[in-house]
Amino acid sequence: MSDVIIKNGHLIDPANAIDRVADIHIINGKVAAIEPANTLNTSGNTQTIDASGLTVIPGLVDCCARLREPGLEHKATIQSETVAATKAGITTLCCPPDTDPVIDEPAVVEFINRKSSNAGHSHVVTLGALTTGLNGERLSEMYALKQSGCVGLSNCRNPIENTLILKRAFAYAATFDIRVFIEPDEHWLSAGGCAHEGKIATRLGLKGIPVSAETIAIARALELIAETGVSAHFGRLSSAQAVEMIARAKNEQLPVTADVSAHLLHLTEQDISSFNSACHVIPPLRTQRDKEALQNAVANNTIDAICSDHQPHDVDAKQAPFASTEAGISSLETLLPLCLRLCQQTSLNLADVISKITHAPADILGINAGTLSVGANADICIFDENEDWQLTSETINSHGKNTPFLGWNFQGKVKHTIVNGNVLFSD
């Protein structure tokens, strides 16, 4: 590892309340010093990045990104998606357990860790399965999964119909101080749905997913969280009612956190009105009121983090009638741009939004990331806040090109990404 000096960049590190122009010295993959601008001197062995006019932040931490490996390598691989993440300024990705095979035993965790280490780009951490095979019937070997490196447990959107099993899962996870990650969905209400249950879905003849599918699942989980004391994270909230429930739970001091997908802060059910399959996502795009409630929840910290909810697909997956297409957006490249757009279009300040994609998700995952503290791993994103660019299939480095944001103009472009002190991307 060479020494690296980043000179004269606008450093924003919300974890340490830093927002100023400064120099950063990286030695042996760690942040060694943060000094006033233009005060660090270079030597012959030092790589220097002139960050004048650029913004320097901790590398982004994405708390939900499906990398498709193992099991769906025809869509994407750990190699392809970690390279794409690095180029998007994302230095840590969290992979849910709904791979094939499911992440329900240490061997699968070790496989993913080995693949990501060999790729040599962004870090990958994993969630283990809450139940064996995600089938909702038998508890997984939770402690073994934790010992193998899983940062939490989840059943994704796979139902656990028996509430007693869910309660036992929460209690067992609490015993070993393991956080449970919940994608709230009442299966019987959402099954077969592909759009928000409302006037637009009715007009288009699409089966709807009601808000109650989300809120009933949240209500059940909150009752069990209160009983068991398990620490829980609610992922991909989509509705105003869900936000209100999480806010009440936080006021009652329940150990809960929440995130939202970046696309749900910018799109609504109106965007599916032309049967645009790129907008087929689960949970579905909801109303303008829901979108505004989600934005407000980000601003008032009811929502703790913003994730990409990255789901790359092959071309064929989106080329069918809307209801028959596969849900999901390829969204690594748009995580930072959509967050910057949120600042540009609302009253949110940049530091607050940066916290939602750096130290806040790192804290939720319980990992040492998302900060530029002296001694921390030197995972850093440097971007030009003012550079205009357009998202095209050519600018998407992920194997998946499925996104409703093709052709959108964005302001703010990643110029350098550093992982473990190594400059892995420069534009």
Image (spheres, rainbow, N blue to C red):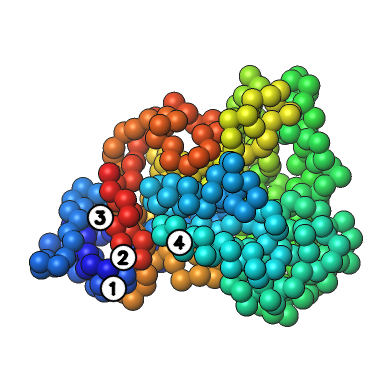
Q: Earlier in the sequence, mark 4 or mark 2?
A: 4
Q: What is the crowding at mark 2: few (fewer than 14 residues within 10 Å), some, or many (at least 20)?
A: many
The residues tagged by marks 4 and 2 sit, at their Cα atoms, a distance apart of 17 Å
The residue where tag 1 is placed is: 28
Q: Which mark is residue 102?
A: none
Q: Earlier in the sequence, mark 2 or mark 3?
A: 3
The residue where tag 3 is placed is: 10
Number of numbered labels in the structure image: 4
- Where residue 70 sits: x, y (%)? 62, 54
Q: Earlier in the sequence, mark 1 or mark 3?
A: 3
**In front: 254, or 386?**
386
**In front: 325, or 290?**
325
Q: What is the crowding at mark 3: few (fewer than 14 residues within 10 Å), some, or many (at least 20)?
A: many
Q: Residue at x 59, y 35 (%)?
A: 314
The residues tagged by marks 1 and 2 sit, at their Cα atoms, a distance apart of 7 Å
The quadrant of the image that shows the N terminus is: bottom left
Element carrying mark 2: loop
- Where residue 269 sits: x, y (%)? 65, 30
The residue where tag 2 is placed is: 421
Q: Nearer the viewer, mark 2 or mark 3?
A: 2
